């Protein structure tokens, strides 16, 4: 309790002991009677004004002190304050986080515990601890003044709910610039340190067989190992000049390109083009394209279809060029032969996994629905969300409600002069696959 307040109470009690209970407090002063010092307790109980007055005074002082404390706790910070306070900030303090993650969390049943964690951070507690354990050495090396798990939790809550830096600053009692700094650091680590571990081209024979067999069960097409698609990620308009970032839906964006397998796990991610670019141009500027064209990626699984050696291939819509390693539909409007139309239907069925994967990505990490980071940090934030998406898919996390972009249209991609040989082999392979598919399904 406040020292000055204690002194005031002491003085009042001393005054009470020195007053003659029989003397009105407002009467003219008189010499103290000798009997005042020998007053009995009963005389105090039956006394006139002074004693009740003192009790009322004490009660008033206590009430005043309580009201001052309440005002202080709800008073907004001054302009010179170094932190932003909020009535909810205690819920998001380091101590509250520690209590939740180390004590309270283990008192809950696993399903309830993980459901609560997913609602806050987009993933279950075991997956959360996996992310923290992998990032902790790197965060510790950065000399960040916050605990690693607290920093990761703060960033995951932003990615999962799309919070702005300003919103999180008020919740965590930190400055917005510090929230941005921590977000940039954690997303950069996810996009660089964890990317090679969780986003990998399926080159091992075991993984290739697993993937191609799963796609064949889905589409009846052999040796399909992935599906490719692009999706615009909306970004803030500020600082963007011209319309090169304006996508087909009319907003400023950057273009995300992903290749997914049958589990909706991404095995390649690229964010290198503004939203106004087309899918074919984005593909040709990616590292994946350069590796496939140069033969750097070796898929050790070759099958024979009607005399054609068919290596593993990916599938895409008509916005991508037809190449030996990339199969696209014969026609966007079903104007081909029965065999070709059947092939197109099965190919688009295989392609649906990447459409669903992107919808799940944007549903799980809502910040991708309207990215509220600077344009220079947009690519690493998007890639970080893709890494987290894979972690969740590999751990078989429950799939949340998805976010689907409007149905897209586009002009069929044209082949380039230096792609002629790839297009020629791709065309013959596609026809062989279509004829083989039609014959197999017709004979059933």
Image: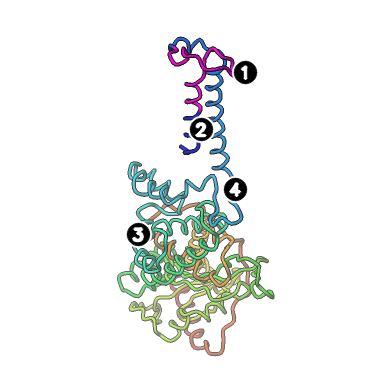
Q: What stretch is highlighted in magenta?
A: 12-39
Q: Is residue 222 magenta?
A: no
Q: Which residue carries the number 3 mark?
A: 130
Q: Which residue carries the number 2 mark?
A: 8
Q: Residue at x 59, y 81 (%)?
A: 414
State left or right for residue 240 relative to residue 55.
right
Q: Which residue carries the number 4 mark?
A: 76
Q: Dividing the picture into quarters, in which one does residue 412 lie? A: bottom right
Give the mark nearer the N terminus: 2 vs 1: 2
Q: Residue at x 53, y 81 (%)?
A: 284
Q: Of residues 107 and 348, which is closer to you in this image? A: 107
Q: Which residue is drawn at 43% across and 59% down?
A: 151
Between marks 4 and 2 in the image, the one whose residue lies nearer the viewer: 2
Which mark is on residue 28? 1
Give the mark nearer the N terminus: 1 vs 4: 1
* Secondary structure beneath label 3: helix
Between marks 1 and 4 in the image, the one whose residue lies nearer the viewer: 1
- The extreme front residue here reads 31
Asked if residue 76 is positioned above or below residue 7 in the image, the reply reads: below
- Gap in angstroms between the C-alphas marked 1 and 3: 80 Å
| Label 2 close to label 3 by CB (< 8 Å) | no
Q: Does the magenta stretch include residue 22?
A: yes
Give the mark nearer the N terminus: 1 vs 3: 1
Percent across and percent down for residue 142 are 40, 68
Q: Of residues 106 and 57, which is closer to you in this image? A: 57
């Amino acid at each position: 309790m406040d020292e000055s307040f204690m002194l005031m109470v002491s003085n009042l009690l001393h005054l009470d002991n020195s007053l003659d209970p029989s003397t009105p407090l407002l009467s003219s002063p008189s010499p103290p009677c000798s009997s005042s010092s020998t007053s009995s307790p009963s005389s105090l109980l039956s006394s006139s004004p002074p004693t009740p007055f003192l009790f009322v005074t004490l009660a008033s002082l206590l009430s005043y002190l309580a009201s001052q404390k309440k005002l202080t706790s709800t008073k907004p910070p001054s302009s010179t304050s170094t932190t932003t306070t909020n009535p909810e900030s205690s819920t998001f303090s380091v101590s509250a986080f520690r209590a939740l993650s180390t004590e309270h969390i283990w008192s809950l049943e696993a399903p309830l515990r993980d459901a609560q964690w997913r609602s806050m951070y987009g993933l279950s507690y075991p997956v959360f601890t996996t992310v923290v354990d992998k990032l902790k050495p790197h965060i510790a090396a950065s000399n960040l003044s916050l605990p690693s798990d607290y920093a990761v939790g703060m960033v995951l809550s932003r990615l999962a709910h799309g919070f702005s830096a300003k919103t999180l600053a008020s919740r965590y009692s930190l400055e917005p610039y510090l929230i941005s700094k921590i977000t940039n650091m954690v997303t950069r680590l996810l996009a660089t340190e964890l990317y090679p571990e969780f986003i990998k081209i399926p080159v091992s024979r075991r993984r290739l067989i697993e993937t191609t067999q799963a796609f064949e069960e889905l589409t009846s097409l052999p040796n399909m190992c992935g599906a490719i698609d692009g999706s615009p990620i909306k970004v803030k308009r500020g600082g963007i000049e011209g319309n090169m970032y304006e996508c087909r839906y009319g907003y400023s964006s950057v273009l995300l390109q992903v290749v997914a397998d049958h589990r909706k796990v991404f095995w390649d991610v690229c964010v290198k083009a503004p939203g106004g670019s087309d899918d074919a141009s984005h593909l040709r500027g990616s590292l994946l394209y350069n590796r496939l064209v140069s033969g750097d990626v070796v898929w050790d699984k070759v099958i024979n279809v009607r005399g054609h050696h068919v290596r593993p291939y990916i599938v895409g819509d008509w916005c991508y060029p037809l190449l030996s390693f990339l199969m696209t539909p014969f026609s966007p409007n079903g104007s081909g032969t029965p065999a070709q139309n059947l092939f197109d239907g099965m190919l688009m069925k295989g392609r649906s996994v990447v459409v669903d994967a992107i919808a799940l990505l944007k549903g799980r990490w809502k910040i991708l629905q309207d990215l509220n980071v600077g344009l220079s940090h947009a690519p690493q934030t998007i890639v970080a969300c893709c890494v987290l998406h894979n972690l969740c898919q590999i751990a078989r996390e429950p799939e949340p409600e998805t976010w689907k972009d409007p149905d897209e249209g586009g002009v069929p991609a044209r082949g380039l002069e230096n792609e002629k040989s790839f297009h020629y082999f791709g065309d013959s392979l596609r026809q062989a696959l279509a004829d083989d598919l039609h014959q197999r399904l017709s004979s059933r």
